[in-house]
Amino acid sequence: AQKITQTQPGMFVQEKEAVTLDCTYDTSDPSYGLFWYKQPSSGEMIFLIYQGSYDQQNATEGRYSLNFQKARKSANLVISASQLGDSAMYFCAMREPNAGNMLTFGGGTRLMVKP
Amino acid sequence: GEEVAQTPKHLVRGEGQKAKLYCAPIKGHSYVFWYQQVLKNEFKFLISFQNENVFDETGMPKERFSAKCLPNSPCSLEIQATKLEDSAVYFCASRNRGPGQPQHFGDGTRLSIL
């Protein structure tokens, strides 16, 4: 079974609007961390935001926020006020400390911001 | 340094040749990870180190892949007898200790096997 599922291969959003990128995960470990990374066309991986499984509040970092619904095992990324520079691939990833500490990635969502 | 530095940016090898990739993690980071990204989306974990010790090598195709992180030297990933399917971008990442610490990625090495 897939540990991290991103069901949207591609998304369009109008500049200045908000967009939600979906991520669901599967783990039996009570302690885990969820991360979102951005990969522009230039190829580098940019860390955006982190949510711990025990965190009570949804994480926020500037225009990025994480809609964490633990019971549904979802960790959707919300980008507010989209900018042209937000066009990129976005990857959701999970770290399970009891399973090696590596990141397990979803297949990514390509976001395209329209002017 | 403050960034993960990977060299070279691009590496071209003929099938059957050896390829060696290098990674200097962020100074002070205890953990180093190698990932393989194929076709711009799928990431595969290869190996991780805690300082110079192998922490997890469950993703490594051991018959041809090897990796080291020696003190005072860049970490390295070596592929012997390369195959066409080894063509990918190889990312190195490092992170500090602590549960919420993110992995910081280098810019990757694009390996092309001809």
Image: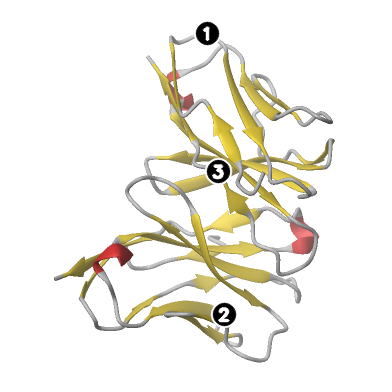
| Left or right: where B4 falls relative to B87 | right
The residue furthest left is: A115
Quarter of the picture holding the N terminus of chain A: bottom right
> Is disc 3 placed on a helix, strand or loop?
loop
The residue furthest bottom is: A56
Residue drawn at x 68%, y 27% as measured from the top left: B76
Label 2 amino acid? Lys
Mark 3 and 1 residues: CB-CB less than 8 Å, in contact? Answer: no
Can residue A27 be seen here?
no
Residue placed under numbered mark 2 in the picture: A73
- Answer few, some or many: residues within 10 Å of disc 1's Cα (few below 14, many 20 plus, some between 14 and 19): some
Chain letter for mark 2, please: A
Gap between marks 2 and 1 measured at Cα: 44 Å
Quarter of the picture holding the C terminus of chain A: bottom left
Can residue A112 be seen here?
yes
Pointer 3 and pointer 1 on the same chain: yes
Residue placed under numbered mark 3 in the picture: B106
- Answer few, some or many: residues within 10 Å of disc 3's Cα (few below 14, many 20 plus, some between 14 and 19): many
Quarter of the view holding residue B40: top left
Pointer 2 and pointer 3 on the same chain: no
Residue drawn at x 84%, y 31% as measured from the top left: B71
| Left or right: where A36 falls relative to B67 | left
Labels 3 and 1: the sequence-earlier one: 1
Residue drawn at x 83%, y 41% as measured from the top left: B51
Chain letter for mark 3, please: B
